[in-house]
Image (cartoon, grey):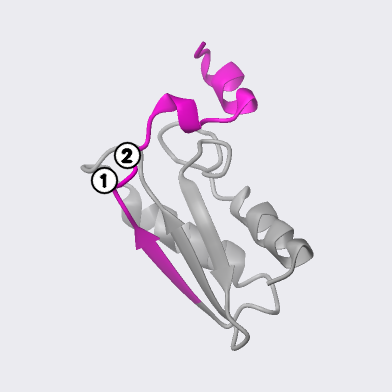
Amino acid sequence: MDAEMKESIYGALENVIDPELGIDIVNLGLVYEVDLSEEGLCVVTMTLTSMGCPLGPVIIDQIRTALFELPEIKEVTVDIVWNPPWNKDNMSRYAKIALGIR
């Protein structure tokens, strides 16, 4: 996958807002990696803010909807991982400011 396509995928994922925090999943640092095969399978490796996050399925549905807007993407797989665990250091400066975190 070229850099332009990777940027497009991350751009689409910035439209996926964590319903509890009101910040997108990219700036929250929840997305660890994206990959796109030549066949159009996009794999998103990510975590959630907590293991018991009740809105995980909602976020996954939003990811699928956002990524299917890109014509190159034919199939989406979201792999939720817990290692490395998420913490506030994963957040972008923008997200920290928006949430009042130092």
**Which residue, given by chain and number where applicable, does mark 2 sit on?**
85
| Amino acid type, residue under disc 1 in the picture | Pro
Q: Residue furthest left?
A: 52
Instruction: Identify which residue is drawn at 75% across, 62% down.
Output: 3
Q: Decide: is 40 above or below 100.
A: below
| Mark nearer the N terminus (2 vs 1) | 1
Instruction: Identify which residue is drawn at 60% across, 17% down.
Output: 97
Q: Decide: is 76 above or below 33.
A: below
Instruction: Identify which residue is drawn at 41% across, 59% down.
Output: 60
State which quadrant residue 84 falls in: top left
Of badges 2 and 1, the one in the foreground is 2
Q: CA distance from mark 2 to mark 1?
A: 17 Å
Q: Residues within 10 Å of mark 1 (few under 14, many from 20)?
A: few
Instruction: Identify which residue is drawn at 58% across, 80% down.
Output: 37
**Which residue, given by chain and number where applicable, does mark 1 sit on?**
54
* Residue 78 rendering spot, x and y as whole percentages: 41, 65
State which quadrant residue 20 falls in: top left
The stretch in magenta equals 76-102
Label 2's element? loop
Q: Residues within 10 Å of mark 2 (few under 14, many from 20)?
A: few
* Residue 59 rendering spot, x and y as whole percentages: 42, 53
Magenta stretch: includes residue 87 = yes
Q: Decide: is 8 above or below 82.
A: below
Disc ID at residue 82: none
5 relative position to 16: left or right: right
* Residue 34 rendering spot, x and y as whole percentages: 55, 62
